[in-house]
């Protein structure tokens, strides 16, 4: 069926994932994340005779890890059907929970624990990370840099190989194809070639740590009480400035790239780095449309499904989306390949390489769906692609108008109150509503600005050759268990049935509590 | 009650501001304006206050109200009421601002670029050796940021590309009219990288004398033969006028615009003996001259200074001097860059408005080296309230270089005594001497030696630097140095500095005055410095604002001693009193009175951008009887300039408009031809018309295309790089028939519809590509990356390469090259697609870059 697989003249030895997971124990971090849960689910569901799984769980006071695991992980909608299908008893005794945190030295595990696991655990899969674009820089570093540093230490102590989950967007600013073969060490987005050695990750990390300490120190010594919010803002500014200086679009990708460079600099470690693009709703596993968290394209989907028509984006640029189950299967494929000796490879998990979806089509589809859902038969015009400046101007105008109306309503209410006329309660309600609406528009504008690097300023196409090759060298049985088939995705169907429906079902309710994009 | 409290406060602030404005107006003799002063009066329109007056006003407000005002206040508000409001808001918001923190030097000295021969070598060396290290802390209006050498190199490369695209010849002078800031750094090295010579001009300091300023700049540009001018946004109209009044200038642009005009061409880097900078002299005696300094000159001078200073790992330079002055450019910036010392850079405007920023910058960055002319030390000693520098610690300042002007004992004593309380060490004061003709510095005191003066109060400026020799010839200071500009070298190798002085027994130089400034009255030589020092003693004279000039007296053939002082005195009786004081004071010093004493209003004595006295200009003012004449309002000055240049500007505008219009018409026609051609070929199914249509379209756009080598007629994958926007049309002009394009996304939006000339269909997925190749089509793949990326870094997408493998067709590399509007497509030897696509891609890249050679 697959037209793009060439029977290579020299058949390399096939990778047997089933055997690999039967042979060795796996250590998994970030198991309660969106991707981590899918990896866990795939392992339990598709490789039921896996040897043993160690899971790192963060502890909270008065909340033992076992309870959290049962409730948050196994009890989550994604794993429920699998637990029901397989039965808890089948795998629960093959799972050991460890209390710890990726950002603590050796994950907060004792030397005895590590010594007892040494030689048994063959693969450490690090799914933990903080996927927030502009957090205070030290928070981002804790998960993404310290996490990488500690997982290197743990992998060494366990004598295990490391599968590290990063992101494709570590490439930073880009206009076009991003190659997998780009050297990791010394990389920064504005690098002028391999001979350019301006960027040294260790110095950079040192610099940020010093600056963070200085900011905290200054705050502590300041005679004036400095609000935590102000310190956080300084830390965000620090990260944003520094990331932008080298060409990264946000603090998240900057810290992730530093994490990668830590791993790539280890001479004795065998590693694989898996870089998913934008992880979105599941194609089929655990069930079509499973999605969690509002980090990635969810705000855009919600804005579109609230009827936003004017989009500041490049219609021809592809949206680098990849379904979460394809990410999960790729991680396990990379892990199996690493176990069998395919080491120090970068796997970019993107789809635009072989089957791009233009951003313009996505917003068109969503607008059609919005009209269909809302039963809007009257022709009001379709999606309009506008420049960033126009979008901003429109937003500002709308905010100004709302403010004007609010002012008017407040004024009328005051008049009504003074003169004892009726209707002051209705007017008060109206003013409050207008104020809320203004806030919502503001949030919408901020969100669009946040996504501008991905929709307008840059164009990303991630080469995904290594995962294709690795997948092709899986055994026939494993290929069915760990599918990788971006070419075969019908994007329109996927986007409406899986993505939009999934977000509306699993994310929207949670997300809409605080803010709304309806206008 | 609580609601009314801020109201009361605002009223009082407003009243205070009004009071300060009234005081200023009265001092300037604008009684009528003062009488009509209202909270809503416009400073500029109603009160006739120019921007310098606003600065004065700002300083006064700050002193009186004890707070710091943002610089933008003058732009944001134009009335006393507006200021009061802004002041109130400012004091409220100040606390929330995040502060830029300067990291003090680590103590580790950066490796010295001993092998460097040019300025470019220095920059490259530090980019290579200490990447990511902050080179400059740029402080501006309370905000700050760090700049690394790599950032300067990046920006400079972009500017260089822009300049090359503008057709700047090698060795052409390019004027820079920019204030201290990142743009200056980029422009300066951009010009050097483009093989041209930077000529830094002083930005206009006094808007009330714009016509004079413009005349001087135009003269200078004409004399130096400048070809291009890089200016900043605020002076773009002035820059345009300069362009039309100086025929040699072919273009004026801002740094941002230049950055965007990329081109790929590289130019040979400058050699050590070539001119690196056209350095302006400060123009104290006459018009400023541009002195050519070679790379070797500049490097020799920097190394000389470095040896004398004894650079160590804890050193940090702080400078507020304009980068357009020799001391600011070579003495501070390039010196700091060479030794890898962090430089904290302020703007002169900031310093003049708030001298304490200099001290704070030294304090914050633990600055050890900072240079400034004498008057600035005087200004700090006189004007700086101790409350503004409370908490400052100057004990780190190991060399306070006092150079560029005559060193005055009074100043040194006053400064040292006053600031000892905040840690200033007396031995830190280090007089120095130099001139643009000798790089910048010629002699400098030894660190820690402390100042020394002779019985007459003339200060020693230290021994000559290493590599420099000084001799006294007929009382004149002459020098010979590795940093000596070749343009001023005399026949015997010595250059006369124009200064008078003598050498002490220890070999230290003592400068006693400028020979041109020396006044010879009835056979007696009088040093103007001595007279000025005496005049400044008199009460009512503003700091550093006295000039002693000698004016030829035709009746006696001798010179008349004229003393001009600035004073705040308003009415004539006060002025007379000040004049009398000056007369007495000079008489006491000289033993005989001056011939004439003028007391003029503040700000009217001609000075350079560095704040140094321009005696030549003062003599000129005396002759024209325009001493003390206040400048015209900025609007009037602007109007005069416009009136003078209107014709030339209009002509240039029409010419430019015509040129763009013709170009637009031609490009429009080209695009229409390409589009119509594509449609016609598809409709009539005449694939062999492609080339003629494409050629017509190209020639309409003034371009040509040619093919070197032959392409296989069918069944191959052609992989080409991109060199310019018309590549696809150029390729169509070379091919016998239309092709299939592998993935059109990379071309989308670049060419609009015209790419349909090149191809008749697009294969976007792998399967479609395989099918097209199996059908026997020629499949063309362009890189998925911006235009202008070097061939060895072109990003080709792999599905097309995999399709070639699968269909078993050859891959033909094609190098597109553009030169003088002609696009050449060179065909390489077909490559057999092996088993690995990644390897295939590397081979294709190699083949394409090979075709360039």
Image (tube, rainbow, N blue to C red):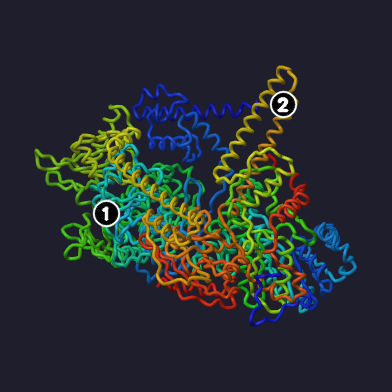
Q: What is the x, y in percent for residue B179?
A: 39, 48
* Chain ID of residue with mark 1: B
Residue in front for this viewpoint, B651 or A431? B651
Residue in front for this viewpoint, B368 or A488? A488
**Residue B106: in sight, yes or no?**
no
Quarter-wise, where is residue B23 in the image? top left
Q: What is the x, y in percent for residue B402?
A: 35, 54
Side of B709 where A92 appears, left or right? right
Side of A408 where B37 appears, left or right? left
Label 2: few (<14), some (14–19) or many (≥20) C-alpha neighbours in 10 Å: many
Q: Which residue is mark 2?
A: A427
Q: Which label belongs to residue B290?
A: 1
Label 1: few (<14), some (14–19) or many (≥20) C-alpha neighbours in 10 Å: many
- State if disc 1 and disc 2 touch (CB < 8 Å): no
Q: Is residue A374 above or below residue B44?
A: below
Q: What is the x, y in percent for residue B797?
A: 57, 66
* Chain ID of residue with mark 2: A
């Amino acid at each position: 069926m697959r037209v793009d697989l060439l029977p290579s003249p020299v058949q390399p030895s096939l990778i047997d994932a089933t055997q690999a997971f039967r042979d060795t124990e796996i250590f998994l971090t970030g198991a309660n994340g969106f991707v981590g849960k899918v990896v866990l689910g795939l392992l339990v569901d598709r490789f039921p005779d896996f040897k043993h799984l160690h899971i790192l769980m963060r502890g909270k006071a008065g909340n033992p890890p076992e309870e959290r695991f049962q409730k948050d992980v196994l009890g989550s909608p994604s794993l429920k059907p699998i637990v029901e299908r397989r039965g808890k008893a089948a795998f629960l005794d093959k799972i050991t929970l460890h209390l710890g945190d990726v950002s603590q030295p050796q994950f907060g595990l004792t030397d005895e624990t590590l010594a007892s696991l040494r030689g048994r655990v063959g693969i450490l899969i690090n799914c933990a990370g903080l996927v927030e674009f502009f957090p205070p820089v030290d928070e981002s570093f804790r998960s993404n840099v310290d996490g990488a540093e500690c997982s290197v230490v743990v992998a060494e102590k366990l004598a295990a190989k490391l599968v590290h989950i990063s992101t494709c967007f570590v490439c930073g600013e880009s206009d076009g194809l991003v190659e997998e073969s780009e050297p990791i060490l010394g990389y920064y987005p504005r690098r002028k070639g391999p001979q350019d050695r301006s960027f040294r990750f260790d110095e950079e990390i040192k610099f940020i740590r010093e600056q963070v300490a200085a900011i905290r120190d200054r705050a502590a010594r300041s005679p004036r009480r400095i609000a935590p919010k102000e310190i956080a803002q300084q830390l965000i500014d620090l990260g944003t400035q520094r990331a932008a200086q080298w060409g990264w679009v946000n603090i998240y990708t900057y810290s992730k790239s530093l994490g990668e460079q830590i791993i790539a600099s280890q001479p004795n470690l065998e590693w694989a780095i898996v870089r998913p693009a934008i992880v979105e709703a599941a194609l089929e596993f655990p069930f079509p449309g499973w999605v969690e968290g509002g980090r990635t394209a969810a705000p855009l989907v919600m804005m579109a499904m609230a009827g936003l028509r004017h989009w500041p984006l490049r219609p021809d640029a592809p949206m680098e989306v990849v379904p979460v189950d394809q990410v999960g299967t790729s991680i396990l494929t990379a892990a199996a390949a690493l176990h069998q000796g395919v080491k120090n490879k970068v796997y970019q998990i993107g789809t635009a390489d072989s089957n791009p979806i233009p951003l313009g089509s996505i917003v068109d589809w969503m607008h059609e769906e919005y009209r269909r859902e809302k039963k809007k038969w009257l022709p009001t015009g379709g999606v309009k692609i506008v420049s960033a400046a126009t979008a901003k101007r429109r937003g500002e105008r709308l905010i100004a108008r709302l403010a004007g109306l609010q002012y008017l309503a407040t004024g009328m209410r005051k008049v009504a109150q003074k003169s004892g006329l009726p209707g002051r309660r209705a007017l008060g309600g109206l003013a409050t509503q207008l104020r809320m609406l203004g806030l919502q528009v503001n949030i919408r504008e901020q969100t669009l600005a946040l996504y501008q690097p991905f929709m307008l300023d840059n164009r990303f196409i991630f080469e995904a050759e290594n995962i294709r090759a690795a997948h092709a060298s899986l055994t026939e049985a494993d290929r069915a268990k760990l599918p990788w088939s971006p070419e075969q995705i019908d994007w329109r169907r996927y986007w409406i049935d899986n993505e939009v429906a999934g977000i509306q079902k699993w994310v929207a309710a949670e997300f809409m509590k605080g803010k709304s994009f309806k206008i | 009650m609580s609601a009314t409290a801020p109201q009361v406060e605002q009223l009082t602030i407003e009243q205070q501001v009004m009071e300060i404005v009234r005081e200023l107006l009265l001092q300037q003799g604008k009684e009528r304006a003062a009488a009509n002063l209202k909270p809503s009066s416009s400073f500029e329109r109603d009160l006739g206050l120019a921007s310098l007056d606003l600065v004065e006003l700002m300083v006064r407000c700050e002193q009186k109200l004890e707070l710091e005002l943002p610089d933008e206040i003058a732009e944001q508000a134009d009335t006393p009421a507006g200021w009061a409001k802004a002041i109130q808001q400012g004091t409220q918001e100040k606390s929330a601002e995040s502060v830029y923190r300067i990291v003090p030097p680590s103590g580790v000295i950066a490796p010295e670029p001993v092998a460097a021969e040019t300025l470019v070598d220095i920059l490259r060396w530090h980019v290579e050796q200490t990447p990511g290290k902050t080179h400059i802390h740029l402080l501006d209006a309370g905000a700050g940021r760090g700049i690394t050498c790599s950032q300067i190199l990046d920006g400079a490369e972009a500017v260089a590309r822009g300049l090359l695209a503008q057709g700047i010849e090698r060795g052409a002078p390019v004027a820079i009219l920019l204030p201290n800031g990142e743009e200056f750094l980029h422009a300066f090295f951009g010009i050097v990288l483009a093989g041209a010579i930077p000529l830094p001009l002083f930005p206009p300091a006094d808007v009330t004398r714009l016509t004079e300023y413009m005349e001087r700049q135009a003269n200078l540009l004409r004399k130096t033969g400048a070809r291009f001018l890089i200016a900043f946004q605020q002076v773009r109209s002035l820059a345009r006028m300069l362009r039309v009044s100086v025929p040699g200038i072919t273009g004026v642009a801002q740094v941002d615009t230049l950055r965007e005009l990329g081109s790929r061409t590289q130019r040979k880097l400058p050699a050590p003996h070539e001119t690196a900078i056209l350095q302006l002299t400060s123009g104290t005696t006459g018009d400023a001259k541009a002195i050519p300094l070679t790379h070797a000159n500049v490097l020799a001078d920097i190394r000389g200074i470095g040896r004398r200073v004894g650079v160590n790992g804890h050193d940090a330079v702080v400078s507020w001097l304009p980068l357009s002055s020799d001391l600011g450019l070579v003495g501070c910036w390039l010196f700091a860059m060479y030794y890898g010392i962090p430089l904290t850079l302020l703007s002169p405007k900031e310093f003049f408005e708030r001298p304490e920023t200099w001290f704070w910058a030294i304090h914050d960055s633990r600055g050890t080296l900072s240079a400034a002319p004498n008057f600035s030390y005087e200004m700090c000693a006189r004007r700086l309230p101790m409350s503004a520098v409370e908490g400052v610690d100057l004990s780190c300042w190991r060399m306070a270089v006092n150079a560029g002007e005559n060193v005055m004992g009074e100043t040194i004593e006053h400064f040292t005594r006053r600031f000892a309380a905040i840690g200033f060490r007396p031995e830190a004061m280090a007089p120095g001497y130099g001139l643009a003709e000798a790089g910048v510095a010629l002699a400098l005191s030894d660190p820690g030696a402390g100042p020394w003066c002779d019985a007459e109060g003339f200060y020693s400026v230290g021994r000559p630097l290493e590599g420099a020799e000084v001799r006294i010839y007929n009382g004149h200071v002459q020098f010979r140095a590795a940093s000596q500009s070749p343009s001023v070298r005399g026949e015997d190798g010595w250059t006369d500095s124009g200064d008078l002085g003598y050498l002490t027994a220890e070999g230290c130089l003592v400068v006693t005055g400028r020979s041109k400034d020396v006044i010879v009255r009835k056979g007696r030589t009088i040093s103007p410095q001595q007279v000025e020092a005496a005049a400044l003693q008199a009460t009512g004279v503003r700091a550093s604002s006295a000039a002693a000039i000698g004016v030829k007296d035709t009746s006696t053939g001798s010179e008349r001693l004229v003393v001009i002082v600035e004073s705040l005195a308003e009415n004539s009786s006060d002025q007379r009193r000040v004049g009398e004081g000056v007369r007495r004071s000079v008489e006491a010093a000289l033993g005989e009175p001056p011939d004439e004493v003028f007391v003029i209003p503040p700000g009217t004595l001609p000075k350079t951008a560095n704040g140094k006295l321009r005696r030549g200009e003062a003599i000129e003012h005396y002759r024209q009887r325009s001493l003390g004449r206040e400048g015209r309002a900025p609007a009037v000055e602007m109007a005069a300039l416009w009136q003078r240049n209107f014709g030339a500007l209009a002509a240039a505008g029409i010419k430019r408009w015509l040129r763009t219009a013709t170009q637009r018409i031609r490009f429009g026609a080209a695009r229409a031809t390409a589009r119509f051609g594509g449609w016609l070929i598809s409709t009539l199914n005449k694939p062999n018309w492609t080339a003629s249509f494409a050629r017509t379209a190209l020639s309409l756009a003034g371009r040509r295309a040619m093919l070197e080598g032959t392409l296989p007629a069918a069944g191959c994958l052609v992989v080409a790089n991109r060199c310019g926007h018309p590549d696809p049309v150029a390729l169509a002009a070379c091919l016998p028939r239309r092709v299939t394009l592998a993935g059109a996304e990379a071309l989308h939006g670049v060419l609009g519809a015209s790419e349909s000339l090149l191809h008749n269909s697009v294969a976007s997925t792998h399967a479609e590509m395989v099918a097209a190749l199996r059908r026997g089509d020629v499949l063309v793949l362009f890189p998925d990356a911006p235009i202008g990326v070097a061939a060895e870094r072109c990003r080709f997408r792999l599905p097309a390469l995999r399709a070639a493998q699968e269909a078993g067709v050859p891959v033909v590399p094609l190098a597109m090259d553009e030169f003088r509007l002609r696009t050449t497509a060179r065909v390489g030897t077909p490559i057999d697609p092996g088993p690995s696509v990644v390897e295939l891609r590397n081979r294709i890249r190699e083949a394409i870059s090979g075709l360039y050679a």
